[in-house]
Image: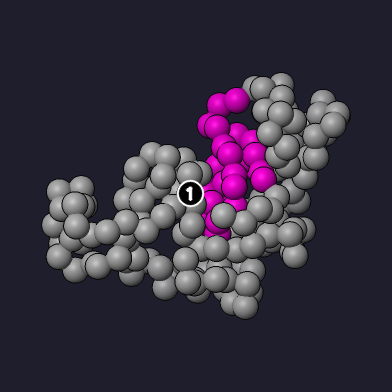
């Protein structure tokens, strides 16, 4: 997987973390984490902290902190995409939205019983998270996600091949 900025969203930015993972960004998120632990992990792993907490940079020497101006997750995604334009490679659905693991293609054979019967009968292409094993398939929401992302970050930046 291509390298680019590695993010750590603070506890206020769970929805943004999910969207960043949808567009293939290496993004950590923990629902409840103390600021000191967040900063220590970001420092140790070379991650950029995304936050809405204007006081966090005062306590985070040696860690890049981006204080987002936007309140809404969609606008936060646009803000991050603009801030890191040229540094981010956008690969839609290349990371697990649940755990941030990398997604890889998996053969349909052997998935019976692991996905709903209708999905197994109607879908031919599947992917699986290397870390947690969650199985994904392209459903009708894919076109909607591409449309939303096209509006937010520009259709020319959305790589729909992944």
The range drawn in magenta is: 6-33
**Can residue 51 be seen at all in this image of the molecule?**
no
* Residue 25 appears in the rendering: yes
Residue at the image point whose x is 32% and y is 51% from the top: 135
Choose between 77 and 38: the one closer to the eye.
Answer: 38
Q: Mark 1 Cα within 10 Å, few/some/many (few <14, many 20+)?
A: many
Position in image of residue 95 (x %, y %): 49, 52
Report the side of 141 relative to 66 (left or right): left
Residue 104 falls in which quadrant of the image? bottom left
Q: Residue at x 36, y 51 (%)?
A: 128
Q: Residue furthest bottom?
A: 156
Q: Residue at x 66, y 53 (%)?
A: 3
Q: Magenta stretch: residue 27 in it? A: yes
Secondary structure at numbered mark 1: loop
**Vertically, is 12 above or below 124?**
above
Quarter of the image where the N terminus is located: bottom right
Judge left or right: residue 63 versus residue 119. right
Give how far across and how far down residue 131 sits, in percent: 42, 40
| Image vertical order of residue 66 relative to residue 152, above or below | above
Q: Residue at x 55, y 32 (%)?
A: 30
Image quarter for residue 155?
bottom right
| In front of the other: 36 or 161 | 161
Query: Would you say 112 lies left or right of 104 here?
Result: left
Q: Which residue is mark 1?
A: 102
């Amino acid at each position: 997987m291509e390298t680019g900025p590695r993010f750590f969203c603070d506890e206020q930015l769970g929805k943004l973390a999910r969207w960043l993972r949808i567009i293939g960004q290496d993004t950590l998120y923990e629902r409840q984490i103390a600021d000191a632990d967040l900063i220590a992990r970001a420092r140790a792993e070379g991650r950029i902290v995304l936050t809405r907490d204007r006081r966090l940079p005062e306590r985070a020497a040696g860690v890049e902190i981006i204080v987002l101006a936007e309140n809404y997750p969609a606008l936060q995604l646009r803000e991050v995409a603009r801030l890191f334009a040229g540094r981010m490679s956008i690969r839609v659905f290349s990371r697990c939205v649940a755990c941030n693991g990398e997604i890889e293609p998996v053969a349909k054979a052997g998935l019976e019983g692991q996905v709903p019967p209708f999905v197994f009968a109607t879908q031919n292409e599947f992917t699986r998270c290397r870390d947690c094993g969650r199985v994904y398939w392209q459903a009708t929401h894919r076109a909607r996600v591409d449309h939303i992302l096209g509006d937010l970050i520009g259709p020319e930046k959305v790589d729909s091949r992944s």
